Image (spheres, rainbow, N blue to C red):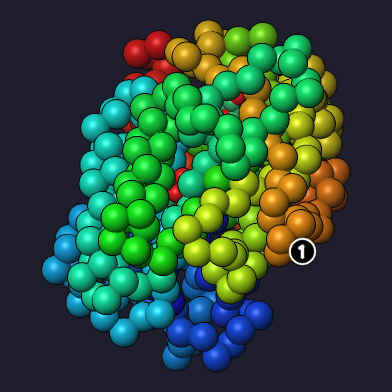
Amino acid sequence: MLVTGGAGFIGSNFIRHILTKYPHYSIINLDKLTYAGNLENLKDFEFNPNYKFVKGDILNSELVEHIAQDVDIIVHFAAETHVDRSVLDPFSFVRTNVLGTHVLLEAARKLGNKRFHHISTDEVFGSLPLEETHRSFHEETPYDPKSPYSSSKAAADHLVRAYHHTFGLPITISNCSNNYGPYQFPEKFIPLFITNLLEEKKVPLYGDGKNVRDWIHVADHSAAVDRIIHDGRIGHTYVVGANCEKSNFEITKLIVNCLGFGEEMIEYVKDRPGHDRRYSVRPHKIQAELGWNPQMNFDDGIKKTIQWYIDNPDWWRRVKSGEYLEYYDRWYNKR
Ligand code: NAD
Ligand code: TYD
């Protein structure tokens, strides 16, 4: 299996899931090691004979064609992933998410139509109004991406489907909701808030704090991708989520209280431009067709996640320095 972006948050959790469940599988992890890639995430697999890391860019077609020659499947996680960064620097999102996906599709085609699974997001469907609680995203929802991040992911999804229809490439796509769990880079909402509080800093809640996201533990996402790559229908898309909608305020309060603080630690800051109001996904297809169901309830998952950041200060203190601090200054000064 060639996994792209396996040194990031979800990719590294997925590789751990696969090599633990199927120890006889071999994985090549191709990752450029951007600010978000971290080899420490898979340090315990460093000497596993079935795991090989290759540092490289998915836009390097020669390299991709070379390492994909003998694989049975490409599972494509590599991407620029943070919406706030896509506001500051949209080009890198188009480059990696659109052009990079295209390079991988071409390699898969040239190498005799390799099986290809594309990891995407529910953000391609746009934003739902808070009050229309009966509405959720599903496989037939029209695309309506709103941010440079989600538009670049939407463009990639279209290319993946086009390669199936035009060249018969055996693809599947998953559009998953917001993930949380261990090894998530602390620029994203949940790990940022946990680590800020562990540093006794306030947490920056955007706008009125009423935006809603649909949360899934990364282990449940990994299990969903496992089911799709093994038994998913070729050419099909699966929407993935754990039926767990929460407002940002609710989650903030939970984290703040869990770490022994009160609401004085919440700082309401200027909203993200174009901030999507609500995401909600209906994962009926994957549940009915592939028998997948989320196993982690949010209360347990968030407690375990908070505990993971308490137990791994070296991991997050190192990544929350250098380049990260520069980005943070740029983000808050530019807005
Ligand atoms: P992440 O930012 O933690 O990791 C991305 C990884 O991709 C990093 O290791 C980085 O080094 C690598 N990468 C970036 N550009 C590259 C390039 N040009 N060549 C090779 N490697 C490159 O992201 P994540 O949160 O783990 O997300 C993984 C995938 O899942 C993405 O495709 C994302 O769109 C999708 N997704 C994420 C979420 C979420 O909540 N985080 C939800 C749904 C879907
Ligand atoms: P994020 O983790 O960036 O994921 P996405 O925007 O892709 O859903 O943000 C999750 C929610 O948290 C989103 O509504 C924006 C909000 N948020 C804040 O309120 N403050 C922050 O500092 C960050 C990073 C996010």
Q: Is residue 74 left or right of residue 278?
A: left
Task: Tell me the quarter of the picture where residue 54 sits.
Answer: bottom left
Residue 248, percent from left and from top: 70, 24
Residue drawn at x 23%, y 57% as measured from the top left: 103
Compared to residue 302, the image places residue 5 above or below, namely below
What's the residue at 47%, 25% (across, down)? 144
Q: Is residue 335 left or right of residue 278?
A: left
Q: Nearer the viewer, residue 167 or 22?
A: 167
Question: In x, y percent, where is residue 309?
Answer: 66, 50
Q: Secondary structure at mark 1?
A: loop
Q: Name the residue type under label 1.
A: Gly
Residue 323 sits above or below residue 254 on the image? below
Badge 1 is on which residue? 291
Identity of the residue drawn at 29% across and 68% down: 108
Residue at the limit of the structure toward the left, as seen here:
62
Figure check: 147 above or below 158: above
Asked whether the viewer can see residue 8, the reply is no
Name above or below for residue 227 compared with residue 266.
below
